[in-house]
Amino acid sequence: MKVEEIDVDEQIGEVGQILSEAEKKKGILIHVLQKIQEDNGYLPGDVLSNLSKKLYFPLSEIYSVASFYKQFHFKPRGKKIVKICMGTACYVRGAKEILNTVEERFNVKAGETTEDLAVTLETVGCIGCCGLAPVATVNDEVKGEISSKKLDRLIKFIKEE
Amino acid sequence: MEKTVKLTIDGKEVQSPEGMNLMDAAELAGIHIPNLCYLKGMKGIGACRLCLIEIEGLKAPMIACNTKVREGMVVNTKTEKVQEIRKFIIDLILSMHPLDCMTCTKAGICNLQKYAYEFDLKESSFTRKKFGYPVDEANPFIKRDPDYCILCGRCVRVCKEQGTNVLEFMGRGIGSKIVTANDKPLQESECTFCGSCVDSCPVNALLEADRWRKGREWEYERINSVCLLCGNGCEITVSTKDGRVQKISSGAPAGSAEKYICAYGRFGFDCIEAETRLTSPMKKIDGELRGTTWEDALKIVADELKKAGKDAGFISAAGILNEDALTLKKLARDVVKTRNFDTTVSLYADSDSLKKSQRADIDRSDLIFLLGLNPSQWERVLPALDAAVRRRINRGAKLVVINSSETRIADVATVSLKGDEISNIKGIIKVAIEKGLKADKKLESSVKDIESTEEIEKASALFIEAKQPIIFSSPALFEAASNLSLLKGKKVIAIPLESNARGVVLMGLTTEGKTYREMLTDKMKALYVVGEVPLNKRPDTDFLIVQNSHLTGLAREADVVLPSATFLESAGTITDFMGRMKYLPEVIEPQGESKSHRDIFILLAKIMGSTIKRPTEAEVKKASNIKVKLSPVPFVKKEGLDISPQEMIESINASVINGSRLLWLKETEKTIAV
């Protein structure tokens, strides 16, 4: 989606009939941010600047709204997004060890992205399948019951193109 | 009259206007309700929860900042229950606040310190949390230290309401922080450094960057005065210690969103002690300016003025005080006996539009017209007007911008009319008359051949609906504006570029001979320049006298330079653009041998063998007391008044900008713009 081509009325739809211009802009903001992230993988600063100019919406407020949600990112993300579950069940079954190994192998700390933008490593609270603990996801694909053998396979899987 | 309601607060019977919140109503009765996030003039957001009070008949405590008064309400603000809650809140905040009150700059005016004392809290009962956020000290104006921040959001709201939108919350919960967009330093975030956030901050998170160990708050003497650096003439509060200015704040009570001052007014005061500051008279010997005595300098000036007589000319800036203007006129007309005395007002305004401007309260208006005006906080052209208009819009008023050039404020206008201003105004009047507003026959016939557009119809509809419209216009378009105002409200105001433009006109400092521009080109025998005028090169004249507080480019080319006091060093009055008389006390003593303009004129007259009496307040009041009546006038756009406001304001403040930290700002803005 090109920021320059956003049509506020089209985005907001029918409900726009009862909203003021300012309310409409507020209304579409998160939606537009999601689309920008979908296209770019993150929210690039220059795109947000253009969005602010296009909508006459303060840049500070755009950042404020986006930073409230953990789903929005301001830095480029890796090709593979690895989330390691640190929930109670996973933790007691060795999640910490998995995390340490992945950190070591890819030389990246949790919450960071490798320099070649191959991998972004994150920790999460609970994925919701504690029966499979310890669990990790790679680009939304769930990998469960990670034993030391499976850990090697997991790493190989992350490395795969 | 506004409707009032009766209620009881802490056993006291209180009468308050309908619709007022309990916080303000209690304040009216002299009862203070503790708060950290409330800003007078703005809607309460109930973030800090300190203002919880109990209302009889309601189970749970309510927040005073966002609960409106009701007839018969019985309110208790100091019950055991709410006091306990308040103590708990302060306890929580203290657990995340550096407890270094002994060296903290804000000690004495810090609200958190005040409430910690009130609730008997030496230390928090919770585990301390330290953030260790970096401090933004990359500019010489505002220091941001987020470790002190209590996240009340006052700065965010002030910044947003005046339309600058620099500060915002980022993140959430315990990780929230107040930052600029993408956490850039202020100078890269379109910050104008007006410092409204500093005035509103209840703690030490935002403060003037130069305040470290420059005196404790309780050592300061606070003096109310007026800033004379542009046509807005804003109220300021000057804090002084040991005869020096330590800081300047907006002239509104702390914790209020009502007043605005810009970076010039707040931070320009360094110029008082700038290197270019003149502290003794100078005369030119062999092409070079050398220091001399007052006696010698005035003797030379007196001789030259006598020689020149009716061919002498006086030009003055309009940032001088009324008393100075009265004395200058007497010196020129009665002592030197010349009819050539004029001010910079003639570059951008005519006296009629200034004299006929009415009074109005922008904070009560529901519709604002900006006609031919381009106020801008970013370019610092009438920034306080820009801020006041944007604030008013954010509180629900409508704005109509009529300007043939592009303006930034048009972005927030309800209707923006481009193209010829006069035809647009005529169109609005025509449509308004057709829709039923009563008008003079002459006026009606003078607009009948105008074609209206959809946008004009919209603007006119807003005007018809409005209860209290205000029309601000450039002096050049005042006639058209005044005709529109005759249909409704008669609130029409021409806005000049200098603080005392209306005052100097009322004091009669308008030429009876050559105009300002003519005196520059007509080779006067002697030219006497008072104050900072937009001139960098010596005009063609036999003898040039410059009387100013700073050694300007023009002063360097003068034959005699007389050092005058700045507006913070001289007492007197101005008459602002709405005709309100404002008083300026002598905040500090004049530097070195500099003297007030009027004292110099009086001394000079004495050497020339005449006596000018010091003007009294009665004399100023008499000169200001004129009766004006608005009546239909021909629609004209006055020619020759189209000087660039930005250039004019920058050049009359050249000494202030070049002699203070504002120079950093100008240079930084230039680099960032590239």
Image (cartoon, coloured by chain):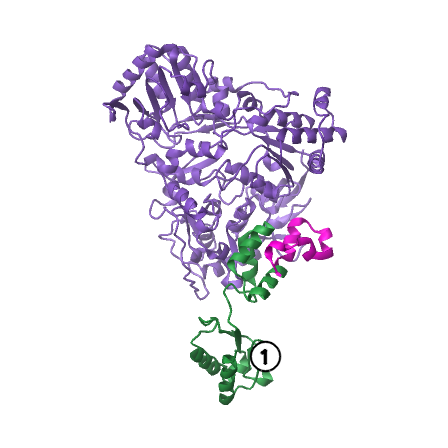
Q: Residue B569 at what x, y percent from top left?
A: 37, 30
Query: Is residue B79 shown to the viewer in this render?
Result: no
Give the amino acid at mark 1.
Answer: Glu
- The quadrant in which residue B133 appears is bottom left
Question: Residue sitting at 27 percent across and 23 percent down?
Answer: B283
Quadrant the N terminus of chain B occupies: top right
Q: Main secondary structure of the magenta part?
A: helix
The chain holding disc 1 is A
Task: Name the residue tied to disc 1.
Answer: A141
Question: Residue sitting at 45 percent across and 45 percent down?
Answer: B193
Magenta stretch?
A1-30
Q: Is residue B92 magenta?
A: no
Q: Colour of chain A?
A: green
In the figure, the purple chain has which letter? B
* Residue nearest the observer in this picture, B571 or B494: B494
- The quadrant in which residue B294 appears is top left
Q: Secondary structure beneath disc 1? A: strand
